[in-house]
Amino acid sequence: MAEAAVAVSAARVGAVATLARHIAESEHQGPFPWAEISIAGAMEDLVTHHPAVEAEDLYRKQLRQARNLDRAAGRALAGPHRSDLRVTHGPKAMAAEFCSTGEQKALLIGLVLAQARAAKTLFGASPILLLDEIAAHLDPARREGLFRLLEALESQVFMTGTEPSLFNGAGASAVVYQVDSGQISESY
């Protein structure tokens, strides 16, 4: 178990660093605020400051010492499941949990787009994106910016929405389908 915990934690540290680089590269592009991200947890501290074998040994020791506490709690009180992804609204230097709901949604969209760019770079192919109701709470300018950024990804994108007008400005490459009473038809 210690080997898996260290491997998961090390992979998370690497993934967050990769994503942070992609966010930094496009910091001021588009209508979505850039984010500062980090992962916080005791396991990440272990893998950041110790070689893997040593981190595994330290975690095994921690598990042994906490066995009675874990048994009493009915769960493991330490491990990679206790880590948190920390997100900060870059332009405002404000932790995401203190941002408005709209700001949080904009941050999340920016993170999804950065992750898609990272996946494209890492794997050499654009990812398929499934975005449920993503345009519903965006103003027209942000919606158009979203469509422009999605088109630049050269990904196949599936978006859902309850109103066809949400997809106005999606671009010539977009195909919009409408589902009505179980029937699917092309909208325009």
Image: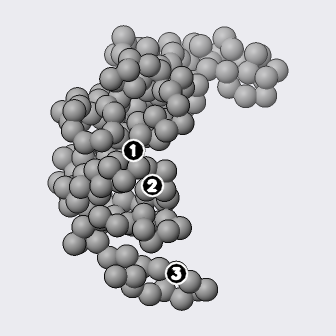
Viewer can see residue 62:
yes
| Spatial separation of the CA atoms under disc 1 and disc 2 | 8 Å
Mark 3 secondary-structure assignment: strand
**In terms of sequence position, does the residue under pointer 2 or pointer 3 come before the other?**
2
- Above or below — where is 1 with respect to 59? below
Please give the residue where the numbered disc 3 appears in the rendered image.
179
Q: Is residue 181 above or below residue 78?
A: below
For label 1, the residue is 109
Q: Is residue 79 above or below residue 159?
A: above
Residue 37 percent location from the top left of the image: 38, 26
Looking at the image, tell me whether mark 1 or mark 2 is earlier in sequence order: 1
- Of 106 and 115, the residue lying toward us: 106
Dot 3 and dot 1 residues touching (CB under 8 Å): no
Residue projecting furthest to the right: 72
Residue 70: percent from the left, percent from the top?
Answer: 73, 21
The answer to whether the residues at label 1 and label 2 have Cβ atoms under 8 Å apart is: yes
Q: Amino acid at mark 2?
A: Ile
Is residue 61 depicted above or below 37 in this figure?
above
Q: Residues within 10 Å of mark 1 (few under 14, many from 20)?
A: some
Residue 84 picture location, percent across and down: 52, 26
Q: Work out how far the residue at label 2 is from the one at label 3, CA to CA, in angstroms.
A: 18 Å
What residue do we see at 19% from left, 55% from top? Answer: 152
Report the front residue among 150 and 55.
150
- Judging by the rendered image, the residue that carries numbered circle 2 is 134
Quarter that holds the N terminus = top right
Q: Is residue 105 left or right of residue 19?
A: right
Q: Residue at x 37, y 76 (%)?
A: 176
* Label 3 crowd bin: few (<14), some (14–19), many (20+), radius 10 Å: few
Q: CA distance from mark 3 to mark 1?
A: 25 Å
Amino acid on which disc 3 is placed: Val
